[in-house]
Amino acid sequence: MLIAYLKLSLRLLARNPFFTFINVVGLSVGFVAFFILWQHGAAEQKADQYHREFQKIARIGGHWRWTEQSGYEGHFVWSNILAYQTGMIFSDFPTVEHTRFIDQYDFRRNVTGMSSSVVVSVEDAGHNIRSFTEFGLIMADPNLFEFFTIPLIIGDPGLVLKSPKSAVLSKRTARRYFGSEDPINQTIRLNDTILYVVTGVFENLPQATHLDFDVVLSNAGMELQWHNPMEFAYTDTYVRLSGPEEFRRFEKELNADKLKYWRALNRIAPNDRGSMFLQPLEGIAFGEGVADSEGLAAVKSRTSLVILQVVAVVILLMAWINYMNLTVSRIKKRSREMGTRKVAGAKAGDFFTQFLIESLVLNAISVGAALTLIQLIRVPFEEYFEIQITGFQSPLQLWIPIACFVLSGVLITSLYPAYLCIRYKPKTLHDTIGNPAATNIASSLLTTLQYVAAFVLISWVFVIYAQLVYSIEKNSLGSNQIMILDAPNTKSKTYATDFDAFMNQVRSRFNATFCSSINGEGGLDRLGLKPLHHDRYDYYNCDGGVDETFVPFFGVKLLAGRNFEPGESGNTMLLSGIAARRMGFKSADDAIGERISAVQLGDPMENARTMEVIGVYEDYIKLSTMDNPIHDGSALVFKDQLFPGFVPNRIQVRLDRDNLNEVTSYI
């Protein structure tokens, strides 16, 4: 009997190709959206839970609080701690299993041997040198691959980082550097000066993690630099303890000796207060697990992931509703067939079985088409939307709810048309063609539900789009149609004069400016500033040394005073409005002409310079509006005349549609 129903279902599909095509396309698209978005949301919500004993791993972070003489109260939350602190902590707690690394963003030349700007050069068999600008480097303890569950394709977890100047590459990076060649024992050159030997290759990190790196450099032999309390390099530091209770105990022990661990920072900020916290590994990606965590960067959002899963369900429901509407409309044409079968003695179970098999066949064809389509779009989808499609590599726990939901949908979509046939008498079914009211009410309700869901989804897309546009515009600092150039990482003795000559050539043809760190990098350089009558320094972001072109180039609004002028003396500076208020000035005009003592973060106080405030500008966002930016004020100084650390590193050239190719080729 089942075979007969199956044959009948296939004949009906073949007899109505247009109906079949519409249903298969609609259901396939619904299944594609559901499979991708549901598995993505479910997998991402389990971020970092693939590591061995992930419940026992936590990251050490820091709270930094201060109250300024003006009454301003500041609060930073760091997701990492200083490298010298880690040396002290694990000397005091030698039995605590730990690992740590310095992210490329926090590279310091005196600690890691290079700055955060890194170019990797490799030489192929034909002695051709290829260079790659890298953004995914870390420098780590030798036990990194033993501590975390990061599968190694080549190499031993306990040995790959044991030797000084050893490097481990991700699979995609090894392929990018060396193609099909064996990467092991190959040499990579960093910034044309530092040689590392490749000792291993690891699997590309999954998307469901807060970790983000492609090249791991060993810190073997560099412990003295890391533990130097005069160097402020931040490390991501992880410990493995017995669980949450042990986290709280260890956190209490760390904060019981605050003065010891924060003494180096308190030397430059004696009235500030530091403390540490432990953040469980499974909460790191979402910025969770920390009290008073405002400002702690979150890589992912649980709310957004849940919304994606809801959208996945709604899209598939809309596809099923569409299928049910079409099936109900076909019942009107098949009503005489159904009436005749009832007269011939067909029971309720016969109608249910028939429509169930029809639904199973059509949904099975649609699922097959959807899985085929997923395989075709998987790579470009991951490339453009950064949504990893794991497919059948996902754990069984993820597929069980998906399978249950799909089977439930198949069952419901078969029950309703079967119910319509069972509900009415044979005479009513024979008359349905002339009197379709029997099926119109349900169809109208389903269609209304479908339209409402579509309206909500479209509105949601427009809202998200508007938020993205707003965020991009707020972050831009007038940066639309600007080419950003990185200066050479290795700077010669004649760099200053060479740079001036280069800028003069560029400016003879295009609108261009420069700075040390571009907007969005978060202010790697900070200045300690205080009015001469204050007794303590407070610290502010600084984009580094600029010249008179920076303010007009980016359209920064001046609130009071003037901009830098050509040939400006190095002892002048511009303050932002928030910085001026933090220093106690009641208005922007009050700050003009004031004398300020300034010192670069990490420099001894005897290196402080006395500077004059010549202008106050309107604050602009330093970080993305999606990264909980902290508006604590900023300052600008003229070139690197007084602060050699503010050497020009970023060049910006204004583009337009007509000169894009001209600028690119000329540069």
Image: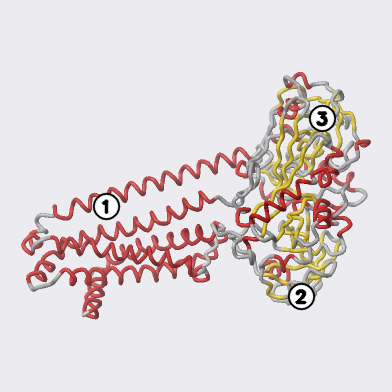
Q: Decide: is 345 above or below 80.
A: below
Rendered residue at 23%/75% (across/down): 11
Residue 21, image quadrant: bottom left
Amino acid type at mark 1: Leu
The mark nearer the N terminus, 2 or 1, is 2
Residue under the image location 73 percent in, 54 percent down? 236
**Mark 3 or mark 1: whose residue is earlier in sequence:** 1
Q: CA distance from mark 3 to mark 2?
A: 51 Å
Question: As drawn, is 577 to the left or to the right of 39?
Answer: right
> Residues under labels 3 and 1: Cα distance?
67 Å
Tell me the crowding category of disc 2: few under 14, some 14 to 19, or many 20 or more residues within 10 angstroms, Cα based.
some
**Circle 3 residue:** 573
Task: Report which residue position mark 1 lands on.
Answer: 446
Q: Amino acid at mark 3?
A: Met
- The secondary structure type at the circle numbered 1 is helix
Query: Along the line of sight, which residue is nearer the eye, 616 or 68?
Result: 68
- Colouring used for the render: secondary structure
- The residue where tag 2 is placed is 184
Q: Is residue 480 visible in the rendered structure shown here?
A: no
Compared to residue 389, the image places residue 515 above or below, namely: above
Give the residue type at disc 2. Ile
**Badge 3 density bin: few <14, some 14–19, many ≥20, Cα 10 Å:** many
| In the image, residue 627 above or below residue 538 | below
Q: CA distance from mark 2 to mark 1?
A: 61 Å
